[in-house]
Amino acid sequence: MTNPSPPRTDARRTLPPATQGNPVLRFLAANKSLVGLVLLMVVVSLFSPSFLTVDNLLNILRQTSINAIIAVGMTFVILTAGIDLSVGSVLAFTGAVCASLVAADANLWIALPATLALGAALGAANGAVIAVGGVQPFIATLVSMTVLRGATLVYTDGRPIGTIDGQAAEGFWAIGGEYVLGVPVPVLLAALVFIVCWFVLSHMRFGRYVYAVGGNEQVARLAGINITGLKIAVYAVSGLLAALAGIILTARLESAQPTAGTAYELDAIAAVVLGGTSLMGGRGHIFGTLVGALIIGVLNNALNLMEVSSYYQMIAKGAVILLAVLVDSRGKKAA
């Protein structure tokens, strides 16, 4: 059995002829998202002097960490040409379960792994429906999103579950609210997730298989890749990271809200797309997703600093995402 060769990612794709002889243009073409992030930060700093303060930058990183963690899991899914609309509901449900365990004074070394395992199991169930049942990812995860949102409301009876009282409360809060060497713990957890997932996608056979399946599923099947097992594993990763985000959010708020995670799947997909990962699968990288999540975080922060109405914020975010997709699409046509 021959293992498939690693597919080309964004960093190695063919560039437009006009850029091939110029190293600066080559860099700009290969790192459009990063250039966009830098330009956005420069423009915002001109309009808001408080933007580049240390406290504000740490605040951006802390608020971006949750979306970034979810977006990493979404990257695995989209690289296989799939989609996961259930991540926001998985976050809410696992967050509620974790909060109830903490409120019952369960040992954190039991409550946290159990919550992560629950998230992975919910994600694996999505993968099984898609890979074994033959249901389209959009439909399968849309159903899962609806069912889990209803299950969260039933489980919580529509009320927040507090985690303020009990022996485990303080340790649990530290996951979302504590600082280590001046850096918020959620930011450190997000960085660890990115490092691990970057290594998996870039240096492990599983990562090569993810790209291969997204590039051409039929060829990957002929090469001997277990498509069913891989898809289940990819959606399990997405569910596990959504559960981790749920733990962090619940710890930071010191309660599990029944409506937590609403529309988080849209921000995660937006971060992946802004980072240059193709919705058709097989092309993209984790670093791009990190940049995409930061673009959304900086944009949200900038609009808040400039006191822009939340209604206009939605329009602005949509316009930026559309612009990024159009630029990427034109770049592919020119290649």
Image (cartoon, rainbow, N blue to C red):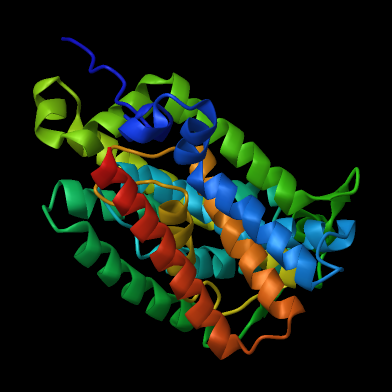
- Residue 50 appears left or right of 261: right
Nearer to me, 18 or 159: 18
Number of disc labels: 0
Quadrant housing residue 300 = bottom right
Residue 284 rendering spot, x and y as whole percentages: 39, 39
Q: Residue at x 58, y 39 (%)?
A: 194
Asked if residue 318 shows in the view, the reply is yes
Q: Residue furthest right?
A: 181
Q: Looking at the image, which residue is at 78% across and 64% down?
A: 45
Give the position of the N terminus as an image quadrant: top left
Considering every residue shown, the one lying at the far top of the view is: 1
In the depicted structure, whether residue 180 falls above or below residue 200: below
Q: What residue is at 47 percent from the left and 49 percent from the top?
A: 275
Q: Position of residue 100 (x, y in %)?
A: 63, 69
Residue 290 drawn at (x, y percent) = 56, 47
Which of the image's four quarters has the C terminus? Answer: top left
Query: Of 217 and 145, which appears nearest the observer?
Result: 217
State left or right for residue 87 relative to residue 189: left
| Position above or below: 103 against 214 | below
* Residue 30 pos. (x, y %): 46, 36
Please, is residue 63 above or below residue 107 in the view? below
The answer to whether residue 108 is above or below residue 50 is above
